[in-house]
Image (cartoon, helix red, strand yellow):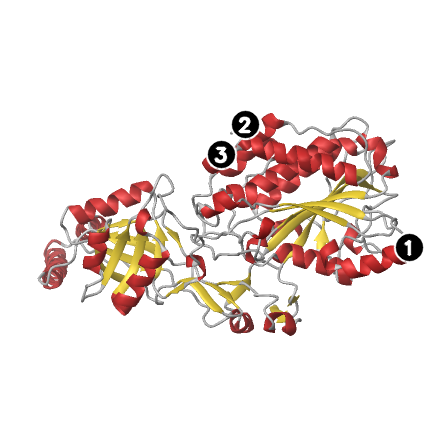
Amino acid sequence: MFQAPIALLLSLLLFSTAAAKGRESDQFVKLTRADPCVRLLSADGPSGCATPAGGAIAPLVAVESREALARVLNATEPVSVALSAELFEASVMHSLRQRLGGLLRGVAVLHSDGMPRGWASPEPASEGGGPGPGGTVLNPSGSGLSRDSFDFGVVLLSAGESAALLGAVRAGGSPLLELKYPMFATGDSLSCLAEGSCLPLGGQSVWGALPPRTAAQSPPAKDKPAVMLTASLDAAAFFHEHAAGAEAAVSGTVALLAAVASVARLAGSAEQLEALPRTPAFALFTGEAYGQIGSRRFFGDVETFRCDNRSREEGAAPQSAAPHPLGPPPSCASPYKPDLRPEAASAERCARRRASEGPASRCPSLGTLADYDAERRGGGRYGSRFDTLEGIDASLVCEASAVAAAAWWRLAGGEGSPAPNCSLVEERRELLGCFLTDPRCATATQLEVEPPTSRYTSAFLPLRGELAASGTAKFAAAFLRAALAPLCPAEPRRSLFPGASGTAEEGSPLCEPTVLTHDAVSPSLEYDAEAGIFRLVDEAAVANGTDALWTESNWPRDTHATLWLYRPSPSEPPLLFAFAATSMATTLAVVALSCSRINRKGWLRVSD
């Protein structure tokens, strides 16, 4: 039979393949933890980074000093740069781009354990609305690097990968860096949305009210104004997965969660809810780092009653499914709409209402837990990967939570003094730690959710409910439901999914915490489900700059960063070709020899 020659042939092929793979593995190191800068697009044009479609590769040079920078700026051949964290700043990136032009094929930013001295925030100055408290400009030292556009790849490396790159350069083996992070979208957000090469920034906001939902009520009550406590869920950063957002987002989120929990467990709070003159409501908005996407969408939808099932319960059923036993979500409940407009947006209307109806008129109040801190923002943490747990004072977060809880409850008309559980806030293993250091913390385990380590604003996916929410939003929603559960007169039901029977246990009223998600996407856009595209519905807001219309480019699955350990010599390709030709000739010779032996010894037998 053919067993012997075939086995020999396969052995040779396997040996050749193993030898080739061994040679290949000695050639490169895959930088699997490299975090890329991606391309964002607004109505004004692109920002961020992108490589050519096929990627780019060039000899690697380490730039860890101003002297090394001066040398590389005089390069006359293609080059990739391993840039120290201290030198990763707007002026250096601009010099590299302007002096090298198309010769610069990529930048790998080396790891740093702490924020370099003199670091400037990569976000623009005055980001978030111009003058702050006392006329101070927000983020005064902001360089605007995150809003710049680079036509080459830029990645952030881990500590181990940084050491590998520097070791390869210092070993003198002429290493190369290959980056492949092409982005499909070009131009501006209007054009990329039209061609389907990008998605709008956003996600899902989380909101609700202290009174629970029952068969008899769906808060906020139609005959009451609301006092709303709000904070931001996400943050900005130059690199996709390194938006820690400790001060920019997590501190406010944790303060709000602790404030809501403290009021919910305040003795007698449940008995006061029905009689309160104002409904205590809360919201955690997504997309605030990019033009207040979440809050503008939420208040715009409520103002114009354009809900269309944008607010919904966890795992809410599609429109074709049976209705929930407690009726539609609060922002879509007929025949009323809750009056949750911020006073700043309706001050004139409220003034007229007060003049005709007196001080009891339904004008809402809005309190925001902001991330403003002139000193820290001036220090460069804002909008950077260095906005970490080490940069905030946990005791101040708890103090802010206490002040917010007391003011919120008092404005709603409640009696008593809520006191946040500071150990829940300050413990590194609890709320702050869950978001910033240990996603598998005890609280997350109990809630059966896992918040991500990055607060980077995601792309909006036109799905339903928390299926499209970020890990941060899911964690916040789960925590709020657990915290508000005691306000129900009976054990709250959680079966809000399609197919739920809609009946409570015998003898207990149906009740559940009022915690919902709401689409966080530019109010200038509407999603056309039939056509599968986003349509612009407010051209004026985009034209006059009211809505920047931020989007994120789509990109292919095959993206990577690779360190090639040496530059091939001119003689290597011919040698590899000769090796391949020799292997082929040897294989053919073995096959010919085997066939001749078969003919002589009769290994091949044919039977009828």
> Residue 117, can we see it?
yes
The nearer-to-camera label among 1 and 3 is 1
- Counting residues from the start of the chain, the first of labels 3 and 2 encountered is 2
The nearer-to-camera label among 3 and 2 is 2
- Marks 1 and 3 in Cβ contact (< 8 Å): no
Residue picked out by circle 1: 357
Q: Which residue corresponds to the image point at 60% horizontal and 41% vertical from the top-left?
A: 253
Tag on residue 438? Answer: 3
**SS category of the residue bearing label 2:** loop
Q: Position of residue 438 (x, y in %)?
A: 49, 34
Dot 2 surroundings within 10 Å: few (below 14), some, or many (20 or more)?
some
Q: Residue placed farthest to the front in the image? A: 134
The residue under label 2 is which amino acid type? Glu
Give the CA separation, mark 1 to mark 2.
Answer: 48 Å
Residue picked out by circle 2: 427
Dot 3 surroundings within 10 Å: few (below 14), some, or many (20 or more)?
some
**SS category of the residue bearing label 1:** helix
Above or below — where is 453 with respect to 445?
Answer: below
